[in-house]
Image: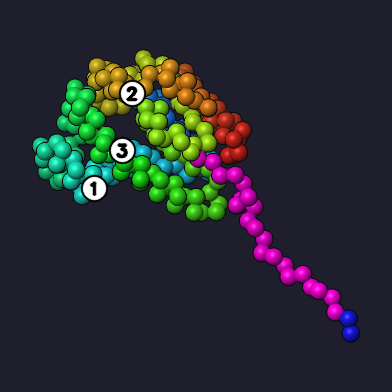
Amino acid sequence: MSTHAIDTPQAATPVLSLRPRQLWGLTGGIGSGKSTVAAMLRDLGAVVVDADALSKSLTEAGGAAMPQIAAQFGRDMLQADGALNRARMRELVFRDADAKTRLQQVLHPLIQAAMASAVERAFANPNVTHVVCDIPLLVESAHWRAGLSSIWVVDCDEATQVERVVSRSQLTPDQVKAIMANQATRAQRNAAADVLVYNQGIGLDKLRQQVGAAAAQLGLS
């Protein structure tokens, strides 16, 4: 009796796993609307990893950065519960470049490690094809650019930045300008952009359309 070889069906490879995975960097000056754009990209299906949120967790009571911060700057920089006194530290680093450098030396390696772990966890899900790293100081640090598929910059003019931040916070215009002076200039950010999102004089619907169109061109929709 003749026999015929029977092909054993192979397990189907999930379609999503065949799609190229992309790691985007998202940045913008204070008041640019970067967080709004991050939320829109999340709504489109991207996983967003927020550097500010990770930094905050590191400097809360019991956070991994707090022992080093206490050793470097003294317990005067801590609140009663052991968390970082952000207002006091902000005032110090704006007037003392050495203090700013020492704080960055403590925080940056911890933030980088936390970001890398979060990205790895996100891509462990076979359904995730796009991860967005929301990094306020992306342009200021060459470290972040390595490995990014593209850099998104959210842009508006400086006067609009100041107006937006003053309207939503207790900061004065001079305090906002001091923060901006410690960030990359508008020209520096825009020069680094692969995708430039202009967020001035438009409503949320127009902004969403702009973000959606750019994301779709890069495979996220």
Neighbour tally class for label 1: few under 14, some 14-19, many 20 plus, Cα within 10 Å: some
Q: CA distance from mark 2 to mark 1?
A: 25 Å
| Nearest-to-viewer mark from 1 and 3 | 3
- Mark 2 vs mark 3, CA separation in Å: 16 Å
Per the image, the residue denoted by label 1 is 63
In the rendered view, does 3 fall on the left or right side of 196? right
Kindly identify the residue that appears in the image at 69 percent across and 65 percent down.
10
163 vs 114: above or below: above
For residue 108, the mark is 3
Q: Residue at x 38, y 40 (%)?
A: 50
Compared to residue 158, the image places residue 69 above or below, namely below
State the image coordinates of residue 32 (x, y, percent, origin top left): 40, 24
20 falls in the magenta region = yes
Q: Which is nearer the N-term, disc 1 or disc 3? A: 1
Magenta span main SS: loop
Q: Which range of residues does the magenta coloring cover?
A: 3-23
Kindly identify which residue carries mark 2.
183
Mark 3 surroundings: few (<14), some (14-19) or many (≥20) residues within 10 A? some
Q: Residue at x 24, y 48 (%)?
A: 64
